[in-house]
Amino acid sequence: MLETAPRTTRVPWRISHGAGFWTIAAAFAAALAFSTVPTPLYVLYQQRDGFPTFVVTIVFAAYAVGVMASLYLAGHVSDWLGRRRVILAATLAEALSAALFLAWPEVPGLVLARLVGGAGIGALTATATAHLSELRAVARPREDHGRAGLVATVVNMGGLALGPLVGGVFASYAVEPLRTPFVFFLVLLLGLAIAVALVPETVERAEERPAYRPQRVALPPGARPAFAGAAIGAFAAFAITGLSMALTPTLLAQGLHENSRLLAGFASFAVFAAAASAQVVFAGLSTRTQLRLGLALMVTGLVALPVAASTSVLWLFLAGGIAAGAGAGLNIRASVATVAALADPPSRGEVLAALFLAAYAGLVLPILLVGIALVWLPSSSALLGFSVLELGLLAWAAPRALR
């Protein structure tokens, strides 16, 4: 049987558990920032090669498919392979993705780069969160365990927020905007991979490795309506973040006639920053209150966004994105807490896997529909259709999740 009790012995060439905590946090944040850095760059690829907006959504969908496949196939293997080994492999996968962006900058290469990057993020997310908690437990055994979870949450959303902003800066001021960001992250990720290799392990690996199996996906018996409500709510929340990651530059250019690359990066940054900030600011509220507030903010943002696109009001577009992002952040946090409370401890990982698979599907299906719609419809109409779909999902999910 595996034991996940943290190791207390020090290997001479390893860094301390406290330093390891911040090393893993930095690697986690850098990988997530890299996953969103292409957001303001898609328009540049589109202008260079002349492909339609629908192709941008395909490139983005490849990332989401990579995340989902990796969550299902590799999200749990650190329990018996070890946390450090999986995080190191995931960080190197992100570095490989950056190298693919540099070596093969045409559409097939972009799709492959995003698929590889998504696979790395899928393996990294749960593993890094668990490793942070275990490292902190050794470094500060008397500290509230919730602090490590809060750091993981801030790193998650904060990393996603920084990527578009960094990409927007490079796109606006770099001499080679389609190369410089990826050179920067390639060097950064390789350096962090070396640092990750020095972090202490926190999982005792059994001498006999268990037979591999994909992540089990289970639903909590007797609580399926509440689970369905939380899962659909998370699907809708991830769709908002997916829209921000994939199509914000297009919506700004077509609907509001704003072509600034820096503005495109800032608009996406604001959505994720709002999600991270809301999770921290309202952490003291009950799960039910967070869910209600999150739903209210999402509805507000989903109403404001199409109005802003149809009237070309930039401040309303930014405010709507911030409201929707804050609501999505609260919704995701409350959905995870709801589902974790529904499941028995032995099946909690399997139930959360089902939740995240449903959530990440929100990064694929709605965004592809919007991309198809943009082939024939103006951006304001496509965004209106997206908002109507999202509001319908929330109307169905809310009473079930709150029950």
Image (cartoon, grey):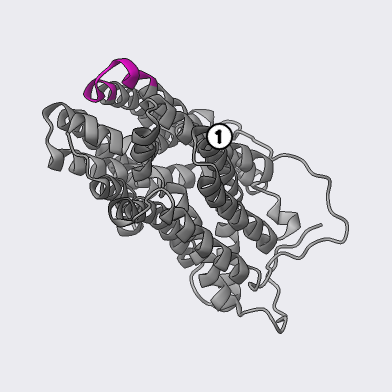
Position above or below: 402 against 336: above
Query: Residue, x 40% and y 22% (percent of image)?
Result: 369
Sort mark 1 into few (<14), some (14-19) or many (20+) by Cα contacts within 10 Å.
many
Which one is nearer the viewer's eye here, 84 or 197?
Answer: 197
Q: Is residue 181 magenta?
A: no
Where residue 229 sits: x, y (%)? 44, 31
Where residue 380 sits: x, y (%)? 22, 24
Farthest residue in the top direction?
376
Q: How many marks?
A: 1
- Residue 283, quarter of the rendered image: bottom left
- Residue 116, quarter of the rendered image: top right
Q: Is residue 376 magenta?
A: yes
Query: Residue, x 66% and y 63% (percent of image)?
Result: 84
Which one is nearer the viewer's eye here, 186 or 348?
Answer: 186
Where is the C terminus found, in terms of image quarters? top left
Farthest residue in the right direction?
208
Position above or below: 217 against 269: above
- Circle 1 — which element? helix
Give the residues drawn in magenta, as a range.
Answer: 372-382
Where residue 313 sits: x, y (%)? 12, 36
User: Which residue was labeled with disc 1?
Assistant: 65
Where residue 402 sits: x, y (%)? 38, 36
Three-letter residue code for mark 1 = Val
